[in-house]
Image (cartoon, rainbow, N blue to C red):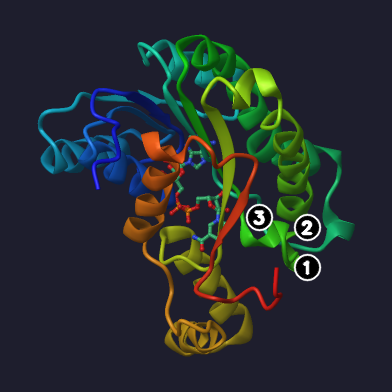
Amino acid sequence: MDLGLTGRWALVCAASKGLGRGCAEALVGEGVNVVITARGEADLLAATTALRAVNPAVEVRTVVGDIATDAGRQAALAACPQVDILINNAGGPPPGDFRDWGREQWLAALEANMLTPIELIKATVDGMAARGFGRIVNITSGAVKAPIDMLGLSNGARSGLTGFVAGVARQPRLAAANVTINNLLPGAFDTDRLRKTMAAGAAKAGQPVDEIAARRRATIPAQRFGTAAEFGAICAMLCSAQAGYLTGQNILLDGGSYPGTF
Ligand code: NAP
Protein backbone atom coordinates (compact mmCIF):
# COMPACT_ATOMS: atom_id res chain seq x y z
CA MET A 1 0.00 0.00 0.00
CA ASP A 2 1.28 3.49 -0.82
CA LEU A 3 1.14 5.38 2.49
CA GLY A 4 0.83 8.71 0.68
CA LEU A 5 3.79 10.29 2.44
CA THR A 6 6.21 11.05 -0.39
CA GLY A 7 7.77 14.47 0.00
CA ARG A 8 6.61 15.02 3.59
CA TRP A 9 9.04 16.19 6.28
CA ALA A 10 9.45 14.36 9.60
CA LEU A 11 11.30 15.29 12.76
CA VAL A 12 12.33 12.01 14.38
CA CYS A 13 13.79 12.62 17.83
CA ALA A 14 16.42 10.36 19.39
CA ALA A 15 16.91 8.37 16.22
CA SER A 16 20.54 7.28 15.85
CA LYS A 17 19.68 3.85 17.28
CA GLY A 18 16.85 1.62 18.37
CA LEU A 19 13.17 2.41 17.99
CA GLY A 20 13.65 6.01 16.83
CA ARG A 21 15.97 4.84 14.07
CA GLY A 22 13.48 2.12 13.11
CA CYS A 23 10.84 4.82 12.68
CA ALA A 24 13.20 7.00 10.62
CA GLU A 25 14.09 4.06 8.35
CA ALA A 26 10.46 3.19 7.71
CA LEU A 27 9.56 6.82 6.95
CA VAL A 28 12.54 7.27 4.64
CA GLY A 29 11.47 4.10 2.85
CA GLU A 30 8.11 5.81 2.25
CA GLY A 31 9.76 8.83 0.64
CA VAL A 32 9.71 11.08 3.71
CA ASN A 33 12.52 13.61 4.23
CA VAL A 34 13.78 13.40 7.81
CA VAL A 35 15.59 15.35 10.46
CA ILE A 36 17.06 12.93 12.98
CA THR A 37 18.56 13.84 16.32
CA ALA A 38 20.78 12.27 18.98
CA ARG A 39 23.45 13.42 21.41
CA GLY A 40 26.28 11.27 20.06
CA GLU A 41 27.60 12.49 16.72
CA ALA A 42 29.30 9.29 15.51
CA ASP A 43 26.21 7.09 15.80
CA LEU A 44 24.07 9.82 14.27
CA LEU A 45 26.34 10.04 11.23
CA ALA A 46 26.34 6.24 10.88
CA ALA A 47 22.54 6.30 10.98
CA THR A 48 22.47 9.01 8.33
CA THR A 49 24.59 6.93 5.97
CA ALA A 50 22.29 3.95 6.50
CA LEU A 51 19.17 6.04 5.93
CA ARG A 52 20.55 7.53 2.71
CA ALA A 53 21.19 3.99 1.47
CA VAL A 54 17.55 3.06 2.20
CA ASN A 55 16.31 5.83 -0.08
CA PRO A 56 18.78 8.12 -1.86
CA ALA A 57 15.89 10.24 -3.16
CA VAL A 58 15.04 11.78 0.22
CA GLU A 59 16.85 14.39 2.25
CA VAL A 60 18.31 13.31 5.59
CA ARG A 61 19.40 16.05 7.99
CA THR A 62 21.02 15.56 11.37
CA VAL A 63 21.02 17.58 14.55
CA VAL A 64 23.40 16.67 17.33
CA GLY A 65 21.94 17.66 20.67
CA ASP A 66 19.97 16.73 23.74
CA ILE A 67 16.30 16.83 22.81
CA ALA A 68 15.45 17.21 26.50
CA THR A 69 16.91 20.73 26.47
CA ASP A 70 15.45 23.90 25.04
CA ALA A 71 18.53 24.40 22.84
CA GLY A 72 18.29 20.83 21.52
CA ARG A 73 14.61 21.24 20.65
CA GLN A 74 15.10 24.63 18.98
CA ALA A 75 17.95 23.26 16.84
CA ALA A 76 15.88 20.24 15.81
CA LEU A 77 12.90 22.39 14.86
CA ALA A 78 15.07 24.87 12.97
CA ALA A 79 16.52 22.08 10.80
CA CYS A 80 13.10 20.93 9.59
CA PRO A 81 11.55 23.13 6.86
CA GLN A 82 8.09 22.11 8.03
CA VAL A 83 7.14 19.43 10.48
CA ASP A 84 4.45 17.27 8.88
CA ILE A 85 5.32 14.31 11.06
CA LEU A 86 6.72 14.43 14.60
CA ILE A 87 8.08 11.33 16.28
CA ASN A 88 8.68 12.10 19.94
CA ASN A 89 11.32 9.96 21.57
CA ALA A 90 14.14 10.20 24.13
CA GLY A 91 16.10 7.81 26.28
CA GLY A 92 14.15 6.23 29.11
CA PRO A 93 14.81 7.06 32.77
CA PRO A 94 16.98 4.68 34.82
CA PRO A 95 15.41 1.86 36.86
CA GLY A 96 15.59 1.87 40.64
CA ASP A 97 13.75 2.22 43.93
CA PHE A 98 11.63 5.33 44.37
CA ARG A 99 13.09 5.76 47.87
CA ASP A 100 16.41 6.65 46.25
CA TRP A 101 15.06 9.28 43.87
CA GLY A 102 14.97 12.96 44.71
CA ARG A 103 13.54 15.98 42.96
CA GLU A 104 16.47 16.11 40.52
CA GLN A 105 15.83 12.58 39.17
CA TRP A 106 12.11 13.25 38.87
CA LEU A 107 12.64 16.52 37.03
CA ALA A 108 15.04 14.83 34.57
CA ALA A 109 12.47 12.12 33.82
CA LEU A 110 9.66 14.63 33.45
CA GLU A 111 11.83 16.80 31.19
CA ALA A 112 12.79 13.95 28.84
CA ASN A 113 9.65 11.84 28.77
CA MET A 114 6.82 14.29 29.38
CA LEU A 115 7.69 17.97 28.96
CA THR A 116 9.88 17.59 25.85
CA PRO A 117 7.18 15.87 23.79
CA ILE A 118 4.63 18.39 25.05
CA GLU A 119 6.90 21.31 24.04
CA LEU A 120 7.41 19.81 20.57
CA ILE A 121 3.69 19.17 20.14
CA LYS A 122 3.04 22.78 21.13
CA ALA A 123 5.62 24.05 18.63
CA THR A 124 4.29 22.06 15.66
CA VAL A 125 0.63 21.20 16.02
CA ASP A 126 -0.99 24.47 14.99
CA GLY A 127 1.14 24.65 11.82
CA MET A 128 0.05 21.12 10.99
CA ALA A 129 -3.60 22.08 11.48
CA ALA A 130 -3.21 25.16 9.28
CA ARG A 131 -1.77 22.97 6.49
CA GLY A 132 -4.44 20.27 6.95
CA PHE A 133 -2.06 17.41 7.67
CA GLY A 134 -0.15 16.33 10.76
CA ARG A 135 0.90 13.07 12.37
CA ILE A 136 2.40 12.91 15.84
CA VAL A 137 3.56 9.63 17.34
CA ASN A 138 4.95 9.53 20.86
CA ILE A 139 7.12 6.56 21.74
CA THR A 140 6.11 5.77 25.32
CA SER A 141 6.14 2.31 26.91
CA GLY A 142 4.02 -0.72 27.70
CA ALA A 143 4.69 0.35 31.29
CA VAL A 144 1.97 2.98 30.85
CA LYS A 145 -0.63 0.19 30.72
CA ALA A 146 1.10 -2.32 32.98
CA PRO A 147 3.50 -0.46 35.26
CA ILE A 148 6.89 -1.98 36.01
CA ASP A 149 7.86 -1.45 39.65
CA MET A 150 11.55 -0.74 38.97
CA LEU A 151 10.66 1.84 36.31
CA GLY A 152 8.72 4.23 38.53
CA LEU A 153 10.24 7.32 36.89
CA SER A 154 9.10 6.05 33.49
CA ASN A 155 5.66 4.95 34.73
CA GLY A 156 5.05 8.38 36.22
CA ALA A 157 6.46 10.68 33.52
CA ARG A 158 4.97 8.75 30.61
CA SER A 159 1.56 8.53 32.26
CA GLY A 160 1.61 12.32 32.55
CA LEU A 161 2.28 12.60 28.81
CA THR A 162 -0.43 10.03 28.07
CA GLY A 163 -3.02 12.02 30.00
CA PHE A 164 -2.06 15.22 28.22
CA VAL A 165 -2.22 13.57 24.80
CA ALA A 166 -5.62 12.04 25.54
CA GLY A 167 -7.01 15.54 25.93
CA VAL A 168 -5.21 17.45 23.21
CA ALA A 169 -5.67 14.82 20.48
CA ARG A 170 -9.43 15.24 20.86
CA GLN A 171 -9.49 18.97 20.28
CA PRO A 172 -11.74 19.44 17.21
CA ARG A 173 -9.40 22.14 15.87
CA LEU A 174 -6.77 19.39 15.54
CA ALA A 175 -8.75 16.21 14.87
CA ALA A 176 -10.96 17.92 12.29
CA ALA A 177 -7.88 19.39 10.60
CA ASN A 178 -6.39 15.94 9.86
CA VAL A 179 -3.89 16.18 12.72
CA THR A 180 -3.57 12.98 14.72
CA ILE A 181 -1.66 12.29 17.92
CA ASN A 182 -1.10 8.73 19.08
CA ASN A 183 1.19 6.88 21.44
CA LEU A 184 3.08 3.71 20.52
CA LEU A 185 3.77 1.54 23.56
CA PRO A 186 6.74 -0.81 23.10
CA GLY A 187 7.02 -4.02 25.06
CA ALA A 188 10.44 -5.71 24.83
CA PHE A 189 12.36 -4.70 21.70
CA ASP A 190 15.83 -5.86 20.79
CA THR A 191 17.69 -2.56 21.10
CA ASP A 192 20.76 -1.29 22.96
CA ARG A 193 18.54 -0.24 25.84
CA LEU A 194 17.10 -3.73 26.30
CA ARG A 195 20.51 -5.35 25.94
CA LYS A 196 22.04 -2.99 28.54
CA THR A 197 19.15 -3.57 30.96
CA MET A 198 19.53 -7.33 30.61
CA ALA A 199 23.32 -7.14 31.01
CA ALA A 200 22.86 -5.15 34.23
CA GLY A 201 20.29 -7.68 35.47
CA ALA A 202 22.63 -10.56 34.65
CA ALA A 203 25.55 -8.92 36.46
CA LYS A 204 23.37 -8.26 39.53
CA ALA A 205 22.05 -11.83 39.58
CA GLY A 206 25.45 -13.36 38.75
CA GLN A 207 23.92 -15.23 35.81
CA PRO A 208 24.82 -15.41 32.10
CA VAL A 209 23.03 -12.76 30.06
CA ASP A 210 21.90 -15.42 27.56
CA GLU A 211 19.93 -17.16 30.30
CA ILE A 212 18.33 -13.91 31.42
CA ALA A 213 17.38 -13.15 27.80
CA ALA A 214 15.95 -16.65 27.22
CA ARG A 215 13.84 -16.42 30.37
CA ARG A 216 12.56 -13.01 29.34
CA ARG A 217 11.67 -14.20 25.82
CA ALA A 218 9.79 -17.15 27.29
CA THR A 219 7.46 -14.73 29.14
CA ILE A 220 6.35 -13.18 25.83
CA PRO A 221 3.57 -15.00 23.95
CA ALA A 222 5.42 -14.31 20.67
CA GLN A 223 8.47 -15.98 22.30
CA ARG A 224 10.81 -13.32 20.93
CA PHE A 225 11.77 -9.67 21.24
CA GLY A 226 10.40 -7.19 18.75
CA THR A 227 12.59 -5.58 16.13
CA ALA A 228 13.11 -1.88 15.47
CA ALA A 229 12.07 -2.49 11.84
CA GLU A 230 8.63 -3.81 12.80
CA PHE A 231 8.18 -0.97 15.29
CA GLY A 232 9.07 1.50 12.54
CA ALA A 233 6.62 -0.08 10.11
CA ILE A 234 3.70 0.41 12.53
CA CYS A 235 4.85 3.96 13.19
CA ALA A 236 4.85 4.70 9.44
CA MET A 237 1.36 3.22 9.19
CA LEU A 238 0.15 5.60 11.93
CA CYS A 239 1.69 8.46 9.96
CA SER A 240 0.06 7.43 6.68
CA ALA A 241 -2.40 9.53 4.74
CA GLN A 242 -4.94 6.75 5.37
CA ALA A 243 -4.68 7.01 9.19
CA GLY A 244 -6.46 10.36 9.58
CA TYR A 245 -9.34 8.86 11.60
CA LEU A 246 -7.06 7.20 14.14
CA THR A 247 -6.24 9.60 16.96
CA GLY A 248 -5.82 9.74 20.72
CA GLN A 249 -4.94 6.04 20.91
CA ASN A 250 -2.41 4.04 22.90
CA ILE A 251 -1.17 1.18 20.75
CA LEU A 252 0.70 -1.66 22.42
CA LEU A 253 3.39 -3.47 20.43
CA ASP A 254 4.40 -6.20 22.81
CA GLY A 255 4.08 -9.63 21.18
CA GLY A 256 0.97 -10.30 23.26
CA SER A 257 2.57 -9.65 26.67
CA TYR A 258 -0.18 -7.47 28.12
CA PRO A 259 -2.60 -9.97 29.65
CA GLY A 260 -5.84 -7.96 29.61
CA THR A 261 -8.81 -8.29 27.27
CA PHE A 262 -8.81 -4.55 26.50
P1 NAP B 1 18.20 2.91 22.55
O1 NAP B 1 18.41 1.71 21.69
O2 NAP B 1 19.06 3.11 23.73
O3 NAP B 1 18.28 4.20 21.59
C1 NAP B 1 18.04 5.46 22.13
C2 NAP B 1 18.28 6.52 21.05
O4 NAP B 1 17.87 7.76 21.57
C3 NAP B 1 19.74 6.67 20.68
O5 NAP B 1 19.81 7.08 19.34
C4 NAP B 1 20.19 7.80 21.61
O6 NAP B 1 21.35 8.42 21.11
C5 NAP B 1 18.96 8.69 21.57
N1 NAP B 1 18.77 9.55 22.74
C6 NAP B 1 18.61 9.15 24.02
N2 NAP B 1 18.41 10.21 24.81
C7 NAP B 1 18.43 11.31 24.00
C8 NAP B 1 18.29 12.70 24.23
N3 NAP B 1 18.08 13.18 25.46
N4 NAP B 1 18.36 13.55 23.18
C9 NAP B 1 18.56 13.07 21.92
N5 NAP B 1 18.71 11.76 21.66
C10 NAP B 1 18.64 10.89 22.68
O7 NAP B 1 16.70 2.96 23.14
P2 NAP B 1 15.36 2.31 22.56
O8 NAP B 1 15.25 0.92 23.04
O9 NAP B 1 15.23 2.62 21.13
O10 NAP B 1 14.27 3.12 23.40
C11 NAP B 1 13.61 4.27 22.92
C12 NAP B 1 12.56 4.68 23.94
O11 NAP B 1 11.61 3.62 24.07
C13 NAP B 1 13.13 4.93 25.34
O12 NAP B 1 12.45 5.98 25.96
C14 NAP B 1 12.85 3.62 26.05
O13 NAP B 1 12.74 3.77 27.44
C15 NAP B 1 11.50 3.25 25.43
N6 NAP B 1 11.21 1.82 25.55
C16 NAP B 1 12.02 0.90 24.97
C17 NAP B 1 11.72 -0.45 25.13
C18 NAP B 1 12.59 -1.53 24.52
O14 NAP B 1 12.34 -2.72 24.76
N7 NAP B 1 13.57 -1.22 23.72
C19 NAP B 1 10.61 -0.84 25.88
C20 NAP B 1 9.79 0.14 26.45
C21 NAP B 1 10.12 1.48 26.28
P3 NAP B 1 22.36 9.21 22.10
O15 NAP B 1 22.52 8.37 23.31
O16 NAP B 1 23.60 9.37 21.29
O17 NAP B 1 21.69 10.52 22.40
| Other-residue count near label 3 (Cα within 10 Å), few / some / many at <14 / 14–19 / ≥20 | some
Instruction: Indicate the quadrant where residue 105 lies.
Output: top right
Dots 3, 1 in contact, CB < 8 A? no
x, y (%) of residue 262?
A: 70, 68
The image position of residue 92, as x and y in percent, is 60, 50
The kind of residue on which mark 1 rests is: Asp
Residue type, label 2: Gly
Find disc 1 in the rendering and name its residue. 149
Q: Do callouts 2 and 1 mark residues in contact (Cβ within 8 Å)?
A: yes
Alpha carbon distance from label 3 to label 1: 12 Å
Residue drawn at (46%, 16%) of the image: 77
Residue in view at x 58 percent, y 23 percent? 120
Asked if the residue at label 2 sits under 8 Å from ligand 1, the reply is: no
Q: Is residue 136 left or right of residue 108?
A: left
The image position of residue 249, as x and y in percent, is 63, 47
Callout 1 crowding tier (Cα within 10 Å): few <14, some 14–19, many ≥20: some
Q: Is residue 141 left or right of residue 24?
A: right
Camera-side residue of 51 and 121: 121
Whether 145 is drawn above or below 160: the answer is below
Q: Which mark is residue 94?
A: 3
Residue receiving disc 2: 152
At label 3, the amino acid type is Pro
Instruction: Residue at 39%, 39% (x, y): give it.
Output: 242
Mark 3 against mark 1, which lies toward the viewer?
1
Tag 3, which secondary structure?
loop
Is 185 rendered above or below residue 262?
Answer: above
